[in-house]
Amino acid sequence: MSVFTPVPEAVLSQWLKNYAIGRLTELKGISAGVQNSNFFVTTTLGRYVLTLFEGIGRAELPYYLHLMAHLARHGLPVPAPIANRDNEYLGTIKDKPAALVMRLSGASVMAPDEHHCTRVGAMLAGLHLAGMSYGRRQPNPRGPAWRTQTAARVHAYLPEAEQALLDREIAFQATIDTDALPAGAIHADLFRDNILWDGEVIGGVIDFYFAGNDTLLFDVAVTLNDWCSLDDGSLDPVRSDAFLHAYHAERPFSDAERAAWPAMLRAAALRFWLSRAEDFHLPREGEMVLVKDPDEYRDILRQRIAWSPALPAV
Ligand SMILES: Nc1ncnc2c1ncn2[C@@H]1O[C@H](COP(=O)(O)OP(=O)(O)OP(=O)(O)O)[C@@H](O)[C@H]1O
Ligand SMILES: N[C@@H](CCO)C(=O)O
């Protein structure tokens, strides 16, 4: 269920008078998604998605919306935000920040094969290359400082063996120096449900609301952990090779990245173990988040500690 704030047609019709996209012909709530209220909006001139932001502060939103506009301008299948007649992307509906973006075609593939992973690797490299000329800066909201603070918050709720795993990982991550790694705007949540496939082609990359500036390798690790893991958390070597080689062909990995890779895979696993554990043990009142299984990412972390694949060489 992901329409937390209902929007009556009359309210939207009125709101759309400040846009140049014609008159409303259809409004439909979207049931997927766990963070915001989303709607498919059809007008006499096109098809759009309306998002009412339920938990993200208004101050953070311009970074995300302008990043989407920037990437779309670079030819990537990212939903372009729609400016209103005051030339603003961000408006307000029912006291919530609200934005319209282009509706893209396609549907998620939840059991990808190596061909999907090849395209995702190339797409992620494309996002990183285009993102290099993006002028705005905002730190990754789930970066190292957040990880340390969240570990402290969830620690007491975990069984002893998991507390020990968490302590060791936080201590290990504190020894990693990321200064030499290429950094830029990253998606930071490029999971399978955030890519829409139009047949074999990527029709859309959506949900930029965890984006921020961080090392590009962290984004590679986040994406690989979701797209290429098996049920026990270990990596499928075929999908993983396909993904990494396709990325490397567009943006070759540096020596510093090769050295930091095992630690980065662990940092990426830790990030989602922590966010899921926090949602599970410390649900915030009034905040509607669908809780995903923290154990999946605990297991991925354990597997990456035990073994990590090498990055492709030059
Ligand atoms: N630009 C778009 N074009 C087509 N479909 C979209 C677009 N944006 C969102 N959708 C559809 O809406 C669904 C929910 O969107 P999204 O994943 O952004 O939800 P959310 O609640 O904002 O974020 P989260 O995935 O973190 O829960 C997607 O699964 C997709 O089906
Ligand atoms: N991709 C996240 C959900 C938030 O977008 C997860 O699987 O935990």
Image (cartoon, helix red, strand yellow):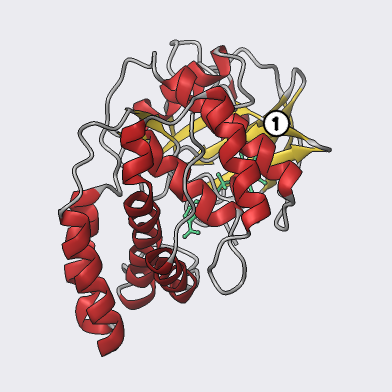
User: Residue visible at 77% across and 20% down?
Assistant: 44
Residue located 16% across and 64% down the image: 171
Asked whether, in this view, residue 147 is left or right of residue 291, the answer is left
Whether residue 264 sits left or right of residue 69 in the image: it is left
Q: For ligand 1, tell me if the residue under mark 1 lies within 8 Å.
A: yes
Location of residue 49 (image quadrant): top right
The image shows residue 235, relative to residue 249, as above or below, that is below
Q: Nearer the viewer, residue 264 or 274?
A: 264
Quadrant in the picture for residue 215:
top left
Residue 223: give x, y in percent of width and height: 51, 47
Q: Residue at x 21, y 71 (%)?
A: 168
Decide if residue 94 is in sight here: no
| Viewer-nearest residue: 110 or 221 | 221
Q: Is residue 162 visible?
A: yes
Q: Position of residue 89 (x, y in %)?
A: 45, 21
- Return the x and y of residue 241 as percentages of the image width and height: 61, 46
Secondary structure found at label 1? loop
Image coordinates of residue 41 in percent, x first then y, are: 68, 34
Number of marks: 1
Residue named by callout 1: 104
